[in-house]
Image (cartoon, rainbow, N blue to C red):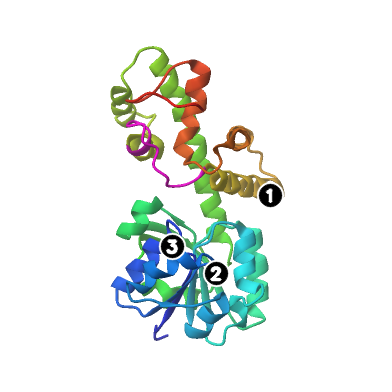
């Protein structure tokens, strides 16, 4: 397959960087987002702007999605003026996290329009999207996957093909996000205990990262986002909760108990109920700090 114009739908924190990398790699690109205010960000880099998902899919044979929820993915793919009504599209590459059930349903509906679906959820955060070091967990038609590998290599440095059954990438992604969330909350609990006992924040991280308690949270998330008390927006609590619910739903369908991870869902649900849903998930530590009457990191703690 000769790759020509690429379509990209969803230009948020992750999608914008991914689309920018494709433009810099020399691919002609047509972009669309429901927020028209984002158009100048892309057109200034040389992208063409479309007014609907259908217009994107009528301009490009390969259309990427990077969208926040399963409902929005479904609307974009098969809703009014959706991708399935485009005249050019042959392959949809969905980098969103939707869970396997949405992928199964979308694959069946798109196939009626002779469109192949590759589910290719991503991990690595905004920094990974910007520098092209994302992990990409793909599944779907082997021929379609091989056709898009040259494109994927511009946005991810770690490509994993999980088989010809669409949805396997989604299962892997929600397992990853579940484990990340649970490890992060566990780290928060331990670090707040250490702070209460008078241990130095940086020293605790140094010890953990040289020992068996290390994780992505202690090595990356907490040093970047919590230690300085800056809490930059990278991934909101409400979207992490969405991913955890998707994983727990899948565990129920599969008959696999997840008692420890259910506690993670409860904690994230509590945080959302307290108005924290739109904040980065690093701010979850503030709840533990408030309950313990202590602080991890360098500056005064705000309200939890």
Which sits earlier in the primary sequence, circle 1 or circle 3?
3
The residue carrying pointer 1 sits among few (fewer than 14), some (14 to 19) or many (20 or more) residues within 10 Å by Cα, namely few
Q: Which residue is mark 2?
A: 164
From the top left corner, tell me how far across and down residue 37 is, in percent.
Answer: 46, 65
- Mark 2 vs mark 1, CA separation in Å: 20 Å
* Highlighted magenta segment, given as a residue range: 224-236
Please report contact status of discs 2 and 1: CB closer than 8 Å, yes or no: no
Q: Which residue is mark 1?
A: 254
Secondary structure state at the residue bearing disc 1: helix
Q: Residue furthest top?
A: 197
Please report contact status of discs 2 and 3: CB closer than 8 Å, yes or no: no
Q: From the viewer's perspective, is 199 left or right of 169? A: left
Main secondary structure found in the magenta portion: loop
Of badges 1 and 3, the one in the foreground is: 3
Point out which mark residue 131 bears: none
Q: Residue at x 58, y 77 (%)?
A: 83
From the top left corner, tell me how far across and down residue 68 is, in percent.
Answer: 55, 57
Which sits earlier in the primary sequence, circle 2 or circle 1?
2
Secondary structure state at the residue bearing disc 2: loop
The residue carrying pointer 2 sits among few (fewer than 14), some (14 to 19) or many (20 or more) residues within 10 Å by Cα, namely some
In front: 61, or 277? Answer: 277
Q: Is residue 40 magenta?
A: no
Q: Which residue is mark 3?
A: 15
């Amino acid at each position: 397959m000769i790759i020509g114009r690429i379509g990209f739908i969803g230009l948020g924190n992750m999608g914008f960087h991914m689309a920018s990398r494709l433009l810099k790699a020399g691919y002609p690109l047509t972009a669309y987002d429901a927020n028209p205010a984002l158009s100048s960000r892309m057109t200034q880099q040389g992208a063409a702007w479309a007014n609907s998902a259908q217009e994107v899919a009528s301009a490009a044979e390969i259309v990427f999605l990077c969208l926040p929820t399963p409902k929005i993915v479904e609307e974009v793919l098969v809703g009014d003026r959706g991708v399935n009504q485009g005249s050019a599209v042959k392959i949809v590459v969905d980098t969103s996290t939707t869970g396997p059930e949405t992928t199964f349903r979308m694959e069946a509906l798109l196939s009626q329009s002779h469109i192949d679906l590759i589910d290719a959820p991503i991990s690595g955060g905004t920094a990974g999207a910007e520098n092209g070091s994302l992990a990409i967990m793909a599944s779907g038609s082997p021929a379609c996957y091989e056709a898009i590998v040259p494109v994927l290599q511009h946005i991810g440095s770690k490509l994993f093909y999980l088989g010809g059954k669409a949805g396997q990438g989604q299962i892997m992604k929600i397992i990853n996000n579940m484990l990340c969330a649970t490890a992060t909350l566990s780290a928060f609990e331990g670090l707040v205990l250490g702070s209460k006992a008078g241990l130095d924040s940086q020293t605790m991280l140094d010890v953990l990262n040289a020992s068996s308690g290390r994780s992505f949270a202690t090595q990356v998330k907490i040093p970047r986002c919590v230690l300085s008390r800056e809490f930059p927006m990278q991934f909101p609590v409400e979207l992490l909760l969405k991913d955890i619910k998707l994983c727990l739903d899948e565990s129920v369908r599969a008959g696999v108990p997840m008692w420890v991870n259910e506690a993670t869902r409860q904690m994230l649900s509590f945080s959302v109920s307290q108005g924290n849903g739109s904040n980065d998930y690093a701010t979850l530590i503030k709840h533990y700090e408030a309950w313990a009457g202590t602080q991890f990191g360098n500056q005064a703690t705000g309200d939890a």
